[in-house]
Image: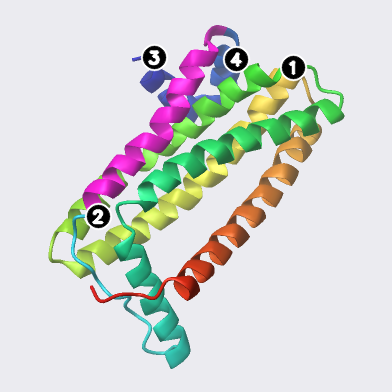
Amino acid sequence: MFLWMDLVALVVHPIRAIPAIDRDRRGLQGAIALGLSVLIPAVLAEVAAFGPYRPPTGLGSFPSLTTQGADIYARWVYQHRFVLPIYEVLGGLLLWMLAGAVIHGAARALKGRGQLAGFVKLVGFVALVGLVSVPVSALQTIARLSANPAAALSVASVGTALGIGVFVWQNVLLVLAAQAHYGLSTERAVTAVLGPVGCLAVLLFGLIVLAAIATVLIRPIGSL
């Protein structure tokens, strides 16, 4: 129950919630929060994987090569739809832990005082805020299982907008967490968080693109 109370507090009163979590919660509770933040979306993705294949839409104005590439990628995602959520769980855990370690190093380099274990606990609770988008993800799952592609597309648009908002808010919470845990000024906390997180985001995006291209080139796409 404490997790949901902390989740609400991080959304409504983050400035008060971050120091309270840093002071009162334990590392195991942060680990549980991090685990739920990646497992619940993965379960919804596994359920949505039972839906039928839908080719990409809205690509009529793009060159034929782009259309073919989008179709190949969509087929590849569909063929691996039951495995990808597992990779997303492992990748999400690794990414959050790596972000915590890198921010810790940057914060200590900026004369911050704090321990890695304590900050990783806060990172787990920051990741938990991603569950705000679970209701929309559940609607997306229902839309994918139905025979209504228009509904799936409209819900996906809402999910994308909400995902961007959650990502921005999580970065704000990371700044507040670094400021509270390491005793940094606002300027140094922003530097400690946004620099490493930006680098990790660019690196992750590049790795995903390279992995997708390599997989498509190495393994021929079979018929669905």
* Horizontal side, residue 18 vs residue 175: left or right: left
Which of the labelled discs sits on residue 114, or is there none?
Answer: 1
Q: Look at the numbered disc 2 and give the secondary structure of its residue.
A: loop
Which of the labelled discs sits on residue 49, or is there none?
Answer: 2
**Location of residue 152 in the rendering, given as x and y in whole percent from the top left corner:** 24, 62
- The range drawn in magenta is 24-48
Q: Is residue 68 above or below residue 110?
A: below
Q: Residues within 10 Å of mark 4 (few under 14, many from 20)?
A: some
- Point out the frontmost of discs 3 and 1: 1
Label 4 sits on residue: 22
Label 3 sits on residue: 2
Q: Amino acid at mark 4?
A: Asp
> Which circle's residue, 1 or 2, is located before the other in the chain?
2
Q: Residues within 10 Å of mark 3 (few under 14, many from 20)?
A: few
Q: Residues within 10 Å of mark 2 (few under 14, many from 20)?
A: many
Q: Amino acid at mark 3?
A: Phe
Is there a contact, CB below 8 Å, between mark 4 and mark 3?
no
Magenta stretch, main secondary structure, is helix
- Point out the frontmost of discs 4 and 2: 2
Residue at position x 53%, y 10% in the image: 26
Q: Look at the numbered disc 3 and give the secondary structure of its residue.
A: helix
Which of the labelled discs sits on residue 66, or is there none?
Answer: none
**Location of residue 19 in the rendering, given as x and y in whole percent from the top left corner:** 61, 15
**Location of residue 41 in the rendering, given as x and y in whole percent from the top left corner:** 35, 42
> Farthest residue in the left direction?
147
Is there a contact, CB below 8 Å, between mark 1 and mark 2?
no
- The quarter of the image holding the C terminus is bottom left
**Location of residue 187 in the rendering, given as x and y in whole percent from the top left corner:** 80, 35
